[in-house]
Image: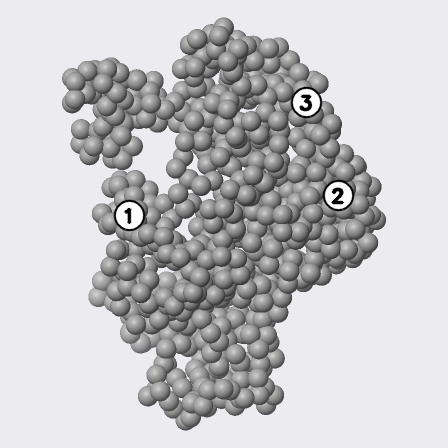
Amino acid sequence: MSSDNGPGDGGAEGPPPEQLALIRESVRGADVPRAKPRTWRGAALAKDRPVARVLVDKGVLHLDRYFDYAVPEELDADAQPGVRVRVRFGAGRHRVRDGRREGGGLIDGYLIERRDESDYSGPLAALAQVVSPEPVLGEELLGLARAVADRYAGSLADVLQLAVPPRSARAEKRASPEPLPAPPAPDAGTWARYEHGPAFLDALASGGSPRAVWNALPGPEWSEEIARAVAATLASGRGALVVVPDGRAAARVDAALTELLGKGRHALLTADAGPEKRYAQWLAVRRGSVRAVVGTRAAMFAPVRDLGLVAIWDDGDDSHSEQHAPQPHALDVLLLRASLDKCAFLVGSWSCTVEAAQLVESGWARPLTAGRDQVRRTAPLVRTVGDTDLARDEAARAARLPSLAWQAVREGLKTGPVLVQVPRRGYVPRLACAQCRAPARCAHCAGPLQAQDAGALRCEWCGRQEHSWHCPECGGFRLRAQVVGARRTAEELGRAFPAVPVRTSGREHVLDTVPDAPALVVSTPGAEPVAEGGYAAALLLDGWAMLGRPDLRSGEDALRRWTSAAALVRPQGDGGTVVVVAEPTLRPVQALVRWDPVGFAVRELAERAELGFPPVSRMAAVSGTPEAVAEFLAAVESPPDAEVLGPVPLPPTLPGRPRRPGAPPPGEQWERALIRVPPGSGSALAAALKTAQAARMARGSGEPVRVRIDPPDIG
């Protein structure tokens, strides 16, 4: 409609002038849409080093290499090594215009280096865009990522996805603070309780690189001791990196460092901070503004400058094992960093893993322990249900809470809180018929029934409620508990001690601390809160549930979980008592009674050496359909000393249940084979598996095969 025409046929009037002015102003103030990355057709190339070597962000093994691209002159200043770029990937030789390849989909990548010439003889595509001029991938981080990819038979792009956090433009625009001067060397503090503790700190403060396996004494001092080790490293003008299993442990080390050094000298890298804040902290570390880092497993790749110390706390915790490809373990990554950067190394725990014991056995690290007299002064009294107790109470052998446990609870509640560790969460995770002991199953899908709350039955698979269950085997209507969870335990204890508050800590709600007042704290392993002043007593229930797992590490994991809970109890001199309900003659129970996790780990290491089990040997797990596994094993050029165990069927993933990492899809039957090699052949095995997997992916044929180096559960 022209301006000469009047109103339309409907008689509608045009908008008033002030509305038109407002619309024009809004259009002028709107952000201009970003243009898509250009193909740079006909653009001049950079005069100096016109070739960019790029790692494309495609985590497939047959593309795990660098690709060359031409650098347009307009991108010359920003296209520096280490920056994020976007490139067009996938154009064939037939899509060439004016001597330059065009087409292909846009994909992210990292610019690795600038070169004068390319090894590729054909036409090169141009860089489409420099996403940000901020260099995020340095030579040290690139070398570490390549070493991790080679060790775990993975791709470099997958490792960098774990190592470099997602970009935040607002975080990049903010300037990082100026670095603070090196602090003075701290005094020994509670490190004086260890035989070589002060010497370890002195070596760090003087610029040395000691390597130690630290068996920490019971109590809350471990976070302060880690903070002093970090402070000693900073005093030498170097950086430090500490990896802990969860956010609660990171918060304790963060508080200890803040109290010792003040704010601004370290960064906290955890998922709780949020993407933007975490990326800002990561950039501060990358730019050299902060020289110390504390965080969870993602922090194992933190780009700390002049790295002088890498430390890991509680290396046996499952949280240190990454679930995304190529699934590296934080301990192995830090060992690689210590070797590549030639820096100090510290692995600490209240317990001791077999891997840590092997580091001492091989001479690579030195033990950092306290004398037996000091251990006795700080450890609680650990009691078991022995023959003397059974003589007084014959029912104690079958009771879940024998009289010794009730007595320990009553005495402990007189002076403070009592911790109760239950290995299973929930109310009653498993039910069975009270007459014939047949498992209680859902009438709809045959899934196991659980008691979510008192009197309510629900299927674990389909979630349907069961109101009129009866046993199909004997016709009975009564149920009994096969396994009692933490919530049911809390309910039973609450009825037994009605005047005492009962708190629970588990997956749904994890407590951080509890006050120093009489209370019952029921917790699952790993979720135990810290009591102010320590617990007066602790009960470790259902030991058979942890010791009876069909896994190579069941005894080691049970002792580690028990030790972590018992370390929160007051010393024996202050009345601290721990009661473990398990067979007293078993080796993990005896190690807990003697408070000798190092001796248990050394003996376990010797037995695994005789049997050829990890960590003495290197293993790889290959899983998939039977046909795919057989085809893959036939194509792998394994080292001559490799030994194939299996394949054996994997437990199927039942419908309605969550799929665990590495488990087969619902309805499929997979097999798993283990490939074992002696020490010295691990790199050759990883290279052979990576080559075979890359060839399989390049062909695009057959069912997928999952390969994992050093699987945590080998049965």
- Sequence order check: which comes first, mark 2 or mark 1? 2
Dot 2 alpha-carbon crowd within 10 angstroms: few under 14, some 14 to 19, many 20 or more: many
Measure how far apart labels 2 and 1 are at the Cα level: 49 Å
Residue 101 occupies quadrant: bottom left
Q: Residue type at mark 2?
A: Arg
- Sequence order check: which comes first, mark 3 or mark 1? 3
Tag 3's secondary structure? loop
Q: Residue type at mark 1?
A: Pro
Residue at the spot 28% in from the left edge and 48% down from the top edge = 649
Answer yes or no: do the residues labelled 2 and 1 have beta carbons within 8 Å?
no
- Sequence order check: which comes first, mark 3 or mark 2? 2
Seen in the picture, residue 309 relative to 453 is either above or below; the reply is below
The residue where tag 1 is placed is 649
Is there any visible trace of residue 535 in the rendered image?
no
Residue at the spot 33% in from the left edge and 67% down from the top edge = 635
Q: Residue type at mark 3?
A: Pro
Seen in the picture, residue 304 relative to 526 is either above or below; the reply is below
Which of discs 2 and 1 lies nearer the camera? The answer is 1
